[in-house]
Image (cartoon, rainbow, N blue to C red):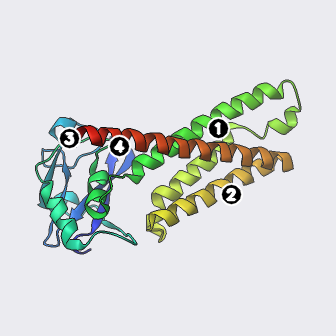
Amino acid sequence: MARGDHFFVWRRQFGVARFQHHGIDLGDGSAVHFTDGRGGVAGPSGDAATFEVKRTELDEVTRNQRDSMHVVEYRDRLPIDETVERAISKIGSRNYNLLFHNCEHFAAWCVLDRWESRQVSVAFDRASSVGAKALATTSMHVAARLSAKSVLRGATPWLLVADAAQWATEAGGHHVGLRDPKRRRNASRAVGVTTAMSVGALAGPLGIAVAGGLWCVGEVAGELSQVAYEKAQHRRLSIHD
């Protein structure tokens, strides 16, 4: 890892759910990141009012090297000196918000001059996709009572396995060489549609068609949710600027 790198470590929430904590390496054994204000790191739980951007030793981030650090790679990014200056300029700031201003948003802003969080984006995307597919599946089950049940049985909740596979690829792709966000996104979609088609194949050709249709519905819903999220984030940033 080098000066100006955007890094993350995996942490657990309540000992079960995993999340990424992000920060900027200053190259001297210290980093700037969102802390919980009590010697720990900011996360999904806790009192956000106490969360503060601080400069701490890397050992505090990694819990004395118990957690591995991973570098987020970018094809295009701001110069290293500017990234470091940006990170240092935010020391002491608060205004933490899990959805719109978390540790990943902060690190991305330092490197890209954009407030973005793949964790939040993927969560919105998959949640919207699952919701849309569940609604579509329910509608198809109702229609099945009036038509060919054997055909529409392919549209079952098991197709949501594709969303789980797609999310896992997006979240864990970094560990198998997919460090570029766009490549991870494309790879996760390929995994999602392939899994959907494979599950649909259990019901035959029409099952494949149904599965493909539901996957497309989910992706459209995911894209629309991203547009809505970005607009909400833009409005919030405009208010706080």
Q: Which amino acid is tagged 4?
A: His
Position of residue 228 measured from the top left corner of the image (x, y, whole percent): 46, 39
Residue appearing at x 44%, y 48% in the figure: 121
Measure how far apart labels 4 and 1 are at the Cα level: 28 Å
Position of residue 10 measured from the top left corner of the image (x, y, whole percent): 34, 56
CB under 8 Å between discs 1 and 2? no
Per the rendering, the mark at residue 234 is 4
Per the rendering, the mark at residue 194 is 2
Marked residue nearer the N-terminal end (2 or 3): 3
Marked residue nearer the N-terminal end (3 or 1): 3
CB under 8 Å between discs 4 and 2? no
Q: Which amino acid is tagged 1?
A: Lys
Per the rendering, the mark at residue 133 is 1
Horizontal side of residue 163 vs 1, given as left or right: right
Position of residue 42 measured from the top left corner of the image (x, y, whole percent): 23, 46
Q: From the image, state whether disc 3 or disc 1 is nearer to you.
A: 3
Q: From the image, state whether disc 2 or disc 3 is nearer to you.
A: 3
Q: Which amino acid is tagged 3?
A: Asn
Measure how far apart labels 3 and 1 are at the Cα level: 35 Å
Marked residue nearer the N-terminal end (4 or 1): 1
* Neighbourhood count class around disc 3 (C-alpha, 10 Å): few under 14, some 14–19, many 20 upward: some
Q: Is residue 59 visible?
A: no
Horizontal side of residue 25 vs 226, given as left or right: left
Residue appearing at x 22%, y 37% in the figure: 48
Measure how far apart labels 3 and 4 are at the Cα level: 15 Å
Tag 4 secondary structure: helix
Horizontal side of residue 185 vs 118, given as left or right: right
Q: From the image, state whether disc 3 or disc 4 is nearer to you.
A: 4
Tag 3 secondary structure: loop
Q: Which residue is mark 3?
A: 95
CB under 8 Å between discs 2 and 3? no
Q: Which amino acid is tagged 2?
A: Thr
